[in-house]
Amino acid sequence: MSDYKALRKNTSAAQCDTRIIEALHDIPVSTMSDSMHRNIGTVGLSPYHQATKQTMAGTAVTVRSRGGDNLAYLRALEFCRPGDVLVIDAGGDLNNAVVGGILTFYAAKIGVVGVIVDGAIRDVAEIRSRAFPVYARGVTHRGPYKDGPGEINVTVSVGDMVVNPGDVIVGDQDGLLAISQDDVERVLAKAREVLAAEARTIAAMEAGQWDRSFIDALEARCNN
């Protein structure tokens, strides 16, 4: 779907099952990362919102914009449904903010569950006063241009992480992961196993029975 002028626009992908999204709220991103070989996820993006215990989780609506320009973001809000995460590839540009307090407020108002910007934001004090998840590469007071061009619902890269439209996005204070809908149930099941193993380790530590013999095996493996 596109009447390509300044923007190329594609229909949003099907949303992930709400049952899975609800389950992901209880899983730390670090645990999911441990379940995905620890070699994917964002680098260089930071959370700017109030910390909460709940993990952000939703379906990706993606945007690629010229650095410092938010025309594509403004249009992409019409492609978002309650439960979506808006993912903006602004090329890592920090010269002009793509969004600020007002536009992130509106995103929350229409049911978007998080905004991710590989670029700059502004109005940080306002954003920090809210629990609505906002991640970005940096901050500047200088506002956006609105000239385009841009693309909506295309494959993007944010914080060195590839995101496809419809991917499940999870985020907390540690960072962000993109998980394909085909893989998300497997990752969820494995993450639950990791949490159970961690709980057993903590219980052993509390009882003074933590078996540290694995360290000997690690050292032996490293010897030349």
Image (tube, grey):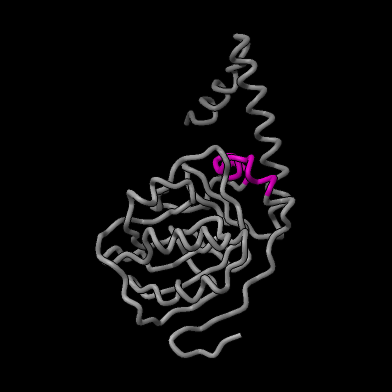
Q: From the top left corner, tell me how far across and down residue 131 is, in percent.
A: 48, 46
**Quarter of the rendering containing residue 54:** top right
Quadrant in which the N terminus appears: bottom right
Q: Is residue 198 above or below residue 131?
A: above
The residues colored magenta run: 22-35
Of 132 and 154, the residue lying toward us: 132
Q: Tell me if 86 is positioned left or right of 57 in this view.
A: left
Of 140 and 189, the residue lying toward us: 140
Q: From the top left corner, tell me how far across and down residue 214 is, in percent.
A: 59, 22
Let me know if residue 47 is in the magenta part: no
Of 210 and 169, the residue lying toward us: 169
Q: From the top left corner, tell me how far across and down residue 9 is, in percent.
A: 54, 81
Q: From the top left corner, tell me how far across and down residue 160 is, in percent.
A: 45, 59
- Going by the picture, which residue comes out furthest to the top? 208
Residue placed at 65% from the left, 33% from the top?
195
Residue placed at 69% from the left, 60% from the top?
16
Q: Tell me if 103 is positioned left or right of 141 in this view.
A: right
Q: Tell me if 20 is positioned left or right of 59 in this view.
A: right
Residue placed at 51% from the left, 52% from the top?
41
